[in-house]
Image (spheres, grey):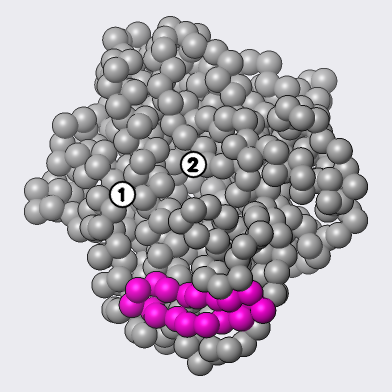
Amino acid sequence: MDPIDLHQIAVKAMRSRGLLPDFAPQVLQEAAAAPQTRPERNGAIRDLRNLTWFSIDNDDTLDLDQLSVAQALPDAATRLLVAVADVDAMVRPGSAIDGHAGANTTSVYTAAGVFAMLPEVLSTDLTSLRQGQERLALVVDMVVHADGTVSASDVYRASVLNRAKLTYDGVSAWLDGAGPPPSQLAGVPGLQDQLRLHDALAARLRQWRNQRGALNLKTITARPVFQDGRLVDLHPDEKNRAKDLIADLMIAANSATAQYLSQKGFPSLRRLLQAPRRWDRIVGLAAGHGVQLPAAPDALALDRFLCARRLADPAGFADLSLAVVKMLGSGEYAAAPAGATGLGHFGLTVNDYAHSTAPNRRFPDLVTQRLLKAAIAAAPPPYSAEALTAIAQHCTLQEDNASKVERQVLKAAAAWLLEGRIGESFDAIVTGAAPKGTFVRIASPLLEGRVVRGFDGLDVGDTVRVRLLAVDAAKSLIDFERA
């Protein structure tokens, strides 16, 4: 199967789930005119271009949504500034581009390529915080104390300049002492100190959340590997120190933006993860390892169990994490009325949490950005509570549809890789058990398939030996039987 076939499968999957794989002519016309359009600059905009801003992202990422910079303060406190691309400055409500973004609500990342939420002339250029380019941004300004608490925060508009585009793998290897310094460190004064300060700051933020029961999970996703345009494997794409660093900073910024809107008396879009849908199964999973969890969902108790298993069985912790993630269930968006507080996220153990740091890739972040800019300008909210409720429901639905498309295309790629291995047996972990079917994941290549024979009695988290029965790349079908 060549990439064109995968692309056709992806397009068909997008359309079948109500997602738009292509930009309409009017969207393309607006995008073509974008380079001649000056972004709106209404209101007070601070000039922060002189600061040592930098980004950390994947090697091939061009749609850069956020930058950061930090400053040491007395008493072991740290000032953290996170700059988020001001996408709203060039994507106006009611435009055709905004209509496409609001329909899909997210970029869709498939093995056939990325179906971007915004045209690339915007997301990878004009609204991307590219290295060496002056850009408008919303800055989340926070004071973080030695214990990881955020005592003060503010949000305002500013112009910024990315001094260095760094990569997760490069920064992580250097921080771990396993690789050379990123090349940009030599050319940007103070950048090395910034990275060290960021690393220490992220550890403080993480420790504070861990003390409250934030779940320490090891999640692995499959990354397609191509050679000369041809799919050759699916490799695990694991978290690393630099990815954790950025995640910790973004969690703090997302929480601060939600609190800012609440303090301004604005409605908002929140990201929620309710109590686990399968807590009883999580209790049973822990019991199988000799640990008794409370009958009611308890994040702190669950995290203690997870930390103990990470130490006891490092090799098997990824599979255990996958089982727990499946039992926790999916996050969702919800509209919060003006001034609402205390809407929490079970896995992160933070209250008042909103997605706000990726407006090039997620529509809820763009909506939140518009709310923030109105609050900063002391203008009325651009969305009513009723409108936000409809947006939240639609974004939750489309996020689920996008995930299904990504899995379907990945399974098509995986089926092609397995065509010559019918009859082989694999060690697997059960990732789904419902009336619609029982599903397992194998490790090499990293993929999921359905158990069509011998699935009785299997439940999420069980380990099982399976045999490959059939594959059909065109139908994204991988069938196993219990061996």
Judged by its main secondary structure, the magenta piece is strand
Sequence order check, earlier mark of 1 and 2: 2
Q: Nearer the viewer, residue 363 or 301?
A: 301
Tags 1 and 2 in contact by the CB under 8 Å rule? no
* Circle count: 2
Quote the CA–CA distance across marks 1 and 2: 17 Å
Q: Amino acid at mark 1?
A: Met
Residue found at x 19% / y 39%: 99
Q: Which label number is shown at residue 471?
A: none
Does residue 478 belong to the magenta stretch? yes
| Left or right relative to 44: residue 209 | right
Per the rendered image, the range of residues in magenta is 466-483
On screen, residue 244 versus residue 86, left or right, reads right
Q: Nearer the viewer, residue 44 or 292?
A: 292
Residue drawn at (63%, 15%) of the image? 152
Can residue 128 be seen in this snapshot?
no
Is residue 414 shown above or below 128? below
- Rendered location of residue 475, percent (x, y): 35, 74
> 10 Å neighbourhood of mark 2: few (<14), some, or many (≥20)?
many
**Can the viewer see residue 236?**
yes
Residue 200, by quadrant, is top right
Query: Closer to the observer: label 1 or label 2?
Result: 1
Image quarter hosting the N terminus: bottom left
Q: Which residue is mark 1?
A: 117
> In the image, is 146 to the left or to the right of 414?
right
Q: Which mark is residue 66?
A: 2
Residue 458 vs residue 73, the one in the foreground = 458
Q: Position of residue 423 (x, y in %)?
A: 58, 89
